[in-house]
């Protein structure tokens, strides 16, 4: 399976338009690499590609990635569909840019499909798409020979909806296995808290692309004050550092290739020279650039 990290920043991107923090300023000055909002592309056969989430930056990301360019016919595209982990704006608004592509398949958990209902009605008028429950029993098979299962990861609904009863299907992770090679990827860009489910998933995976939104829990307050995107109260993202952070948990899985993504603009991991980055490197967990491509 080929995997391309199309974007690696949390909601708002890096730099964030309305943030003048030292990190965002360094990105504007070209001292740190800018990053687009989190999105991944995968394929089992190099012909049929699947997007994992649809970021607001999807047009730029598709344009920057030759494997995803259209052809050979004037309106052919290798993009077959989108697997949504949640209904957050930074993961779903890219669907609008894909409107009119006939027959795209979109997988999402039921509450996310329901939240998107008005948007689905709009999109389906450009070209009808196939919308399916990602948590359907036994998972689903994607063109190109990938078999997928979804796994509940968090209960936080998106801010644009009125409060509603708790449901653990608002945020999910995917396990994607290449039927031909057996290579398996776990994709979990939004992890509210580390769980046994994640430990179990990692024992069956070769590679994991994981929530690295915040390095420390107190970064969330800074982000909330910055006023866009990720980081309002009840942030829904396990921090990297600390005794209950994801890095301690990831240290238990040295045989798995582990990559942090969905980095918030407050996160010191954005700076390759930071002490935070050294700490993560020490455990063997990676932070890659937008456009990074690898095989699982
Ligand atoms: C998140 O990942 O926490 C969300 O994208 C936050 C948001 O954009 O409101
Ligand atoms: Mn987000
Ligand atoms: Zn900033």
Image (cartoon, grey):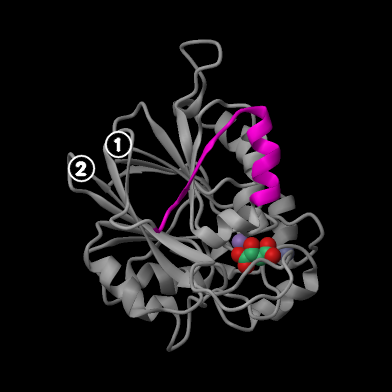
Q: Which residue lies furthest to the bottom in this view?
A: 243
Considering depth in this image, is 122 or 197 the residue closer to the camera? 122
Left or right relative to 153: residue 165: right
- Quadrant of the image occupied by residue 50: top left
Left or right relative to 149: residue 69: right
- Quadrant of the image occupied by residue 45: top left
Residue shown at 57% from the left, 78% from the top: 166
The residue where tag 2 is placed is: 179
Q: How far apart are marks 1 and 2 (CA)?
A: 8 Å
Left or right relative to 197: residue 263: right
Residue shown at 54% from the left, 69% from the top: 274
> SS of the residue at dot 1?
loop
Q: Is residue 33 visible?
A: no
Percent x, y for residue 168?
49, 73
Considering depth in this image, is 211 or 89 the residue closer to the camera? 89
Left or right relative to 100: residue 49: left
> SS of the residue at dot 2?
loop
Q: Can residue 3 be seen in this view?
A: yes
The residue where tag 1 is placed is: 44
Ligand 1: image quarter: bottom right
Region rendered in magenta:
117-135
Percent x, y for residue 152?
43, 68
Tell me which numbered mark, 1 or 2, is placed earlier along the sequence.
1
Does 122 appear in magenta?
yes
Considering depth in this image, is 256 or 26 the residue closer to the camera? 256
């Amino acid at each position: 399976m080929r995997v391309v990290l199309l974007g690696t920043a949390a909601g708002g991107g890096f730099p964030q338009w309305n943030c003048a923090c030292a990190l965002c300023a360094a990105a504007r000055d070209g001292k740190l690499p800018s990053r687009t909002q989190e999105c991944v592309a995968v394929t089992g056969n190099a012909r049929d590609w699947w997007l994992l989430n649809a970021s607001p930056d999807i047009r730029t990301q598709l344009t920057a990635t030759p494997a995803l360019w259209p052809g050979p016919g004037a309106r052919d595209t290798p993009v077959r569909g989108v697997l949504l982990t949640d209904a957050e704006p930074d993961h779903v608004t890219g669907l609008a840019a894909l409107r009119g592509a006939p027959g795209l398949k979109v997988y999402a958990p039921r509450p996310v499909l329901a939240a998107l209902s008005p948007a689905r009605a709009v999109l389906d008028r450009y070209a009808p798409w196939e919308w399916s429950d990602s948590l359907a029993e036994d998972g689903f098979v994607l063109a190109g020979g990938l078999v997928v299962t979804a796994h509940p990861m968090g209960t936080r609904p998106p801010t644009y909806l009125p409060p509603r009863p708790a449901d653990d299907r608002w945020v999910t992770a995917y396990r994607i296995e290449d039927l031909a090679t057996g290579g398996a990827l776990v994709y979990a860009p939004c992890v509210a808290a580390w769980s046994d489910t994640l430990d179990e998933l990692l024992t069956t995976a070769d590679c994991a692309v994981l929530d690295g939104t915040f390095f420390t829990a107190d970064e969330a307050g800074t982000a909330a004050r910055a006023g866009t995107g990720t980081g309002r109260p009840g942030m829904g993202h396990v921090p990297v550092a600390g005794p209950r952070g994801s890095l301690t948990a990831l240290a238990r899985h040295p045989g798995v290739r582990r990559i942090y993504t969905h980095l918030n603009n407050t996160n010191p991991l954005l700076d390759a020279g930071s002490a935070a980055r050294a700490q993560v490197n020490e455990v063997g967990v990676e932070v890659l650039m937008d456009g990074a491509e690898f095989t699982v």
